[in-house]
Amino acid sequence: MAESLDIRFLPADRASLEQRAAIMNAAYEGYYVPVRVTPEQLARFDDYHDVDLAHSVVVQSRWEPVGMALLARRGERAWISAVGVLPAWRRRGIARDMMTHLLANARSLKVKRASLEVIAENKPAQALYLSLGFRVQRELLTWRRPATAEPLPVPVERLAEMPSRRLLESYAGWHEQHACWQREGATLGKMADRLKGFRLDWRGKPTAYCLVGGADSSDGAVSLMDVGVNPQSGLLMPGRLLLQALAVSYFGRPFSIMNVPADDSLGRILAALDFHVAVRQVEMALDL
């Protein structure tokens, strides 16, 4: 167990952004999904997701950082992310002790439920979380459409660019399922100034919207941060027209949308438009 090692569990706010980014990059090197963050990106991550650094943890040995795990908090709910141990220190109980430490912190903050996501292929991590009492809630899918995909039909409808914050006023009622932490309204509201918003009017009524990030990235990838559809208009046709019109606006660019619940009807639209599942994650939760 980690107790026999010469290591210390420190609040994450004792480490600089540069130190935490270095720990995360080293711990996730060669991971199932490549992870590489800059200090600036990590600072935005902390802000967008309400990371509580004072109750998150960095593990330090006498010689080097060992690992890190972050605890985000919204009222009585918490979200755990960035759980990672450097390769040379794995299989010594450090991840378990980090999780135990975070959960104790969450309980001290009167948190009622903690959630996390784990890559479906990462069976050891899933086994650890199950042993700590977490239970599987649902499968989350990241969908991608490559730039080389066949062009989509051009709809008559066109998108109107609108402020993201205005579009988020419809967030609560325009989603089939509760979103994961990274795509909750609270998260999107914090990043709204960095997102572009588009609305589709169909049959004379506001029908669907999307929030787009990464459209100016160096690799040209377009991230669909949110897709909302007015339930009074149905889902499939307005959602399809929305994404077809968006593909016209960003012709020749790759698209992605992360952590869509596997049984959400949005997946049917994405599959019909030549998106494919690139990453499968398991959402897990623990009642404290």
Image (spheres, rainbow, N blue to C red):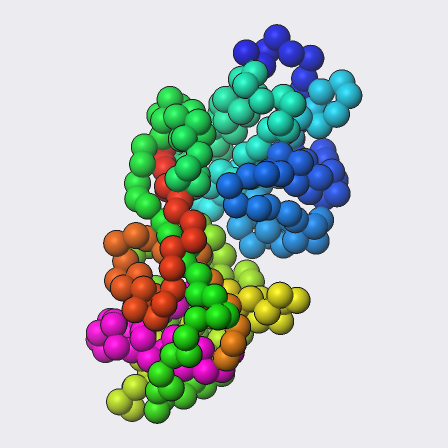
Check the image and report above or below for 202 versus 114.
below
Q: Position of residue 124 (x, y in %)?
A: 44, 27
The quarter in which the C terminus is drawn is top left
Residue 257 among magenta residues: no
Check the image and report above or below for 125 versus 234.
above
Residue at 44% from the left image edge and 40% from the top image edge: 119
Check the image and report above or below for 218 versus 42.
below
Horizontal side, residue 65 vs residue 207: left or right: right
Check the image and report above or below for 99 versus 280.
above
The quarter in which the N terminus is drawn is top right
Residue 240 among magenta residues: yes
Residue at 65% from the left image edge and 12% from the top image edge: 5
Horizontal side, residue 31 vs residue 176: left or right: right
Question: In front: 114, or 140?
Answer: 140
Q: How many marks?
A: 0
Question: In front: 46, or 236?
Answer: 236
Span shown in magenta:
225-250
Q: Position of residue 164 (x, y in %)?
A: 50, 73
Q: Position of residue 101 (x, y in %)?
A: 53, 24
The kind of secondary structure the magenta stretch mainly shows is helix
Q: Position of residue 205 (x, y in %)?
A: 30, 86
Residue at 69% from the left image edge and 13% from the top image edge: 6
From this viewpoint, which residue is outermost toward the top?
4
- Res 55 → quadrant: top right
Question: In front: 225, or 114?
Answer: 225
